Image: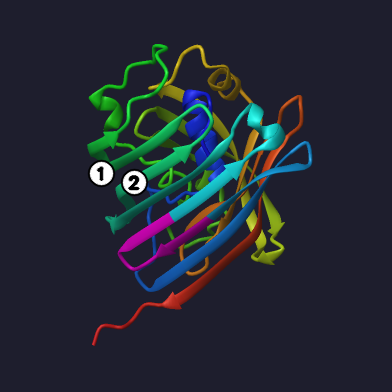
Amino acid sequence: MPFPHSAGRAFLHAISAIAFVAAGGALDCAQAQSRLQAEYSITMAHITVGKGVWVTEIGPDQYTATASGSASGILSVLVSGEGVISTQGAFKDGRLLPAVFTSKMDSSDDKTDLRMRFENGNVVELAAEAPSDSEPRVPVTEAHRQGVLDPLSALLIPVGGTGEVISVEACQRTLPVFDGRRRYDLKLAFKRADKVKADKGYQGGAVVCSLAFQPIAGHRPTSALVKYLSQGRDIELWLAPIAGTRILAPFRLSITNLIGNIVINAGKFETVAQASPKTP
């Protein structure tokens, strides 16, 4: 789901497609394999304007995730077109580490086709088309490609320890994201615990985090959407558990604005946990 405004496009695309697998925290997946199938609707002022589909599989030492999304109608003020993004990676030292990320987005004003390869959280290979616009952007340095997550590997939240996964600790983190063009932070903070219910699949506890967007590099300083997102908007991210793991996935996202709130909500959120095959 491409966006006409630089970092804002990348941020909202990743959120709208709800395609996230995260790093940075202890996991307990060695004894389980899980598959999450989720379908999301995107509404603005209670009018459906888009949709997203996400499938992720979590194994004993590897993971994959693929998402697609599209939007139109009134939401075209912020986003238009469609896209597919995917990632794959491995578990290492209690973390999810992305290995390869690909993104293909197509909108009326831009097209993106890129591939990134990671090693230990650092981008070591990047193949991408140059931005189609000529307006100056904040330069991306080599340092901006170090210690980062791809957009898919940014918002599935692993929770360490052995206690409840619906916890304050789930929200207390900053997610450093690099999408191949832009570097930005997503800062989470705990707001409350709540309940959610999908039309199909999960119903139960969820943790609600506030989310703040901070552009760092690769964006156009004059971008209206970047300014809009970074000026203290009231953004809430609702996270629900993936069965068989200590990982939380996005269930709902809401952005408050004067025209009409943008809400992305899971109508389907089905997780299946399976015991890992035992080694003879």
The three-letter code of the residue at mark 2 reads Phe
Which of the numbered marks, if any, corresponds to residue 127? Answer: none
Residue drawn at x 67%, y 63% as measured from the top left: 204
Asked if 9 appears above or below 220 in the picture, the reply is below
Examine the rendering and report whether any part of residue 75 can be seen.
yes
Residue drawn at x 39%, y 15% as measured from the top left: 137
- In magenta, the rendered stretch is 54-65
Examine the rendering and report whether any part of residue 18 can be seen.
no
Which of the numbered marks, if any, corresponds to residue 101? Answer: 2
Q: Position of residue 13 (x, y in %)?
A: 52, 38
Asked if disc 1 and disc 2 are in contact, CB closer than 8 Å, the reply is yes
**SS at mark 2 in the image:** strand
For the image shown, how many numbered marks are present on the structure?
Answer: 2
Query: Disc 1 marks which residue?
Result: 118
Specify whether 43 is left or right of 275: right
Residue drawn at x 70%, y 56% as measured from the top left: 195
Secondary structure mostly seen in magenta is: strand
